[in-house]
Amino acid sequence: MANILVIGAGGQIGTELVLALRKKHGEQQVVAADIKNECPPLLVGGPYVQMDVLNRDSVRNYIIYKGFDEVYLLAALLSATAEKNPDFAWKLNMEGLFTILDLAKEGHIKKIFWPSSIAVFGPTTPADMTPQTTVMEPTTVYGISKQAGERWCEYYYNKFGVDVRSIRYPGLISYKSLPGGGTTDYAVDIFYKAKSEGKYTCFLNSDTGLPMMFMDDAIRATIELMNAPKNQIKVRSSYNLGGVSITPASLSAEIQNQMPSFRIDYKPDFRQEIADSWPNSIDDSAAQNDWGWKHEYDLKSIVKTMLDNVFPE
Ligand code: AKB
């Protein structure tokens, strides 16, 4: 029976990942861990532990005592929040990773999942259909931490045989749990405002193209990658994952198709510069070839699912 730990379980990805893993392996097989004392309401069906990933000794003691087949390390500061608190972002995003990589190296964890991001790319990266291997000169603290993390994951695999797997997530769109502190968050906020007020003021310009993905696809990708046979995982830094290339204008046009009264205006803030440094679209052929990845949700089905499920009538 699988024995799985998800650290950062209260976040946007963590919540849905725990639900999906519990559905697959059973409620009691998946421990949710987060910094908060209270278990997130959606996760009360299974085990929950309060965990500060920066408390290395207590994380080590817990994992050595329990031993885990799989650990998903999702605790991190995202791009916009990280720019406001660079020292803490670097500390949180890097130290937790070392703790978990070392535990795997010592044999206390069999397999690790660690999320990277399109933020590893920068203004000098080819922006359209960004290749798996290309120029990477990120200009955000978050991007720098993710790029460094990727290098360390690959290093631990090459030097110590640590089975660590990773995806460069695009912006993720979901309705079960909210994102927090990212540059792509507008693509979720827009639905809450559309349903509650019928209008939205976007913090990015209308023509800012970014790769996005519906959460169900992202969770399926994560689980498929973790279940793929070891010899199929050729990339030990992190896999590009595409999805749909969306601008605020194309997203709002599709919302208007399905909800004609919806209105949008634009008031770009500091997040515009971050978004401008990231790709418009991603080439994920390495993930397709190595472990059979294929996304399912297109713009129309994402918008329909979000409008149906955010503040359902
Ligand atoms: C962010 O906007 O910071 C994240 C990401 C793309 O990694 N959603």
Image: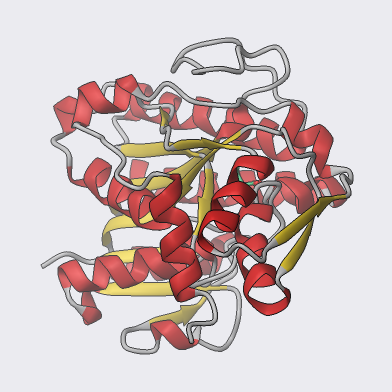
Residue 312 in picture, x, y percent from top left? 48, 82
Q: Is residue 22 above or below residue 85?
A: below
Of 184 and 163, the residue lying toward us: 184
Q: Residue at x 54, y 66 (%)?
A: 11
Please state which of residues 125 and 267 is positioned toward the viewer in this rendering. Answer: 267
Front position in the image: 170 or 36: 170
Rendering quarter of residue 72: bottom left
In the rendered image, which quarter contains the N terminus?
Answer: bottom left
**Which residue is drawn at the image coordinates 74% and 60% (left, top)?**
263
As drawn, is 202 to the left or to the right of 186?
A: right
Q: Is residue 111 among what the camera can see?
A: no
Q: Position of residue 75 (x, y in %)?
A: 56, 58
At x 28% / y 51%, what residue is drawn? 220
Q: Is residue 121 above or below residue 125?
A: below
Quadrant in which ligand 1 is drawn: top right
Image coordinates of residue 43 in percent, x first then y, are 40, 82
Residue 31: x percent and y percent? 34, 74
